[in-house]
Image (cartoon, rainbow, N blue to C red):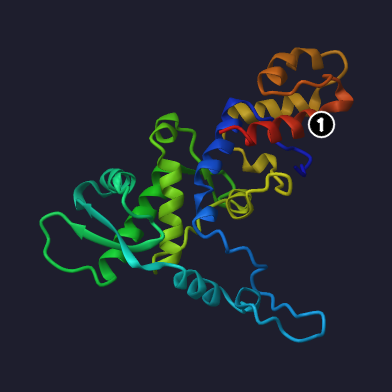
Amino acid sequence: MKMKAQLPFATRKARQLSVLCAEMHFILKSLSSMQPVCGLRTSDDDGHESSDPISTFQSSEDILNWIGSQVDETNTFSICVSRTDLYNRGMQQWQRQKKTSPKCRLKVTFFAEAGIDTGALTKEFLTEMLVEIEKRLFVEGPDKKGKNPVYCLNSLDCNYFRTAGEVMAASLAQGGPCPNFLREWCFSYLFSGDSDSIQVSASDVTDLELLQLIVKINTANDDNISDLIGDVVTCGYTGIVFVDKRDSIISKQFYHKSRIS
C-alpha cells in the first residue's frame, strides 16, 4: 500500500474501516465486468479502434447505460417496504430475498398502496435508501471532502454494509442516484479491491484516537518507540519495532488488517 506522510496507524477502528469496505466490495462483485479505464478509447495494435464495447466508453452516461444493460430482465428482485420505516425494513427485506439476485430487475411495492412498479417506485426507493445509507453508515471528515464508513459493530454484524454495497450497485444499474458521498480512498477500494495502490492520509481519519496515534508514530524516537510495541503487535505487525521501520510498521499492519474479514 502506498502511504502519504501521515498514514493512519491501523488500530482496531482502522481495521474496522477496512472490514466495512470489504463488506461493501459487493458493488464491484455484482458488476464484476465493470473494470475499464473510464473515459478512454483504446485501439488495437494496428491502430484500429477495439471492437470491445467496454473499451469504447466516452462518458459516464455510456458507462451507466452499459451497466444497465447487464441487469437480468428475465427475473425480478421484489421488495415490499413501509414508508414509515423504509431503511430498516428495506435492509431486512433485501437480505431475506434469497430466491433471486439483486442483479435482477428490482420491483418495489409499498405497504397499503396500490400500483404497479414501472420504474418510478424503484427509483424512489433507491433514492430514499441511499439518503439513509449515507446518513446512518457514513461519517464526514472536517475537510468536507467525502465520507468514511462509520464505526458501528451492530451494522457490521447485521451485514448492513454488504447490503449497502448491493443497493449502491443496483442504484447505478437501475436508474437510481449515484453514491457520490464517498471519500476518494473509499471509492477507490470499492472499485478496485486493491489496497496496495490506495493512498490514505491523516485527513481521511475521522477518529480522534487514530489521529493521536498518527502523532505518536510519526514523532517516535529510539527512546520511546518501545512504548508502542503493544499497539503494533495488537494490530498484527510481527517485525522488528525500530524507528527506521516506521513506514513498514504502518504499511504492513494496515495491509494485514485490510485483508481480515
Residue 240, picture quadrant: top right
Helix, strand or loop at label 1? It is helix
At 85% from the left and 27% from the top, the residue drawn is 245
- Residue 147 lies, in percent from the top left, at 53, 47
Q: Which residue is mark 1?
A: 248
Residue, far bottom = 48
Q: Is residue 129 above or below residue 71?
A: above
| Relative side of 116 to 96, left or right | left
At 34% from the left and 53% from the top, the residue drawn is 129
Residue 8 seen from this side:
no
Question: For this rendering, which residue is in front, 125 or 243?
Answer: 125
| Relative side of 110 to 215, left or right | left
- Residue 17 lies, in percent from the top left, at 56, 37
Q: Amino acid at mark 1?
A: Ser
Q: Is residue 189 above or below residue 255?
A: below
At 71% from the left and 29% from the top, the residue drawn is 253
Quadrant containing the N terminus is top right
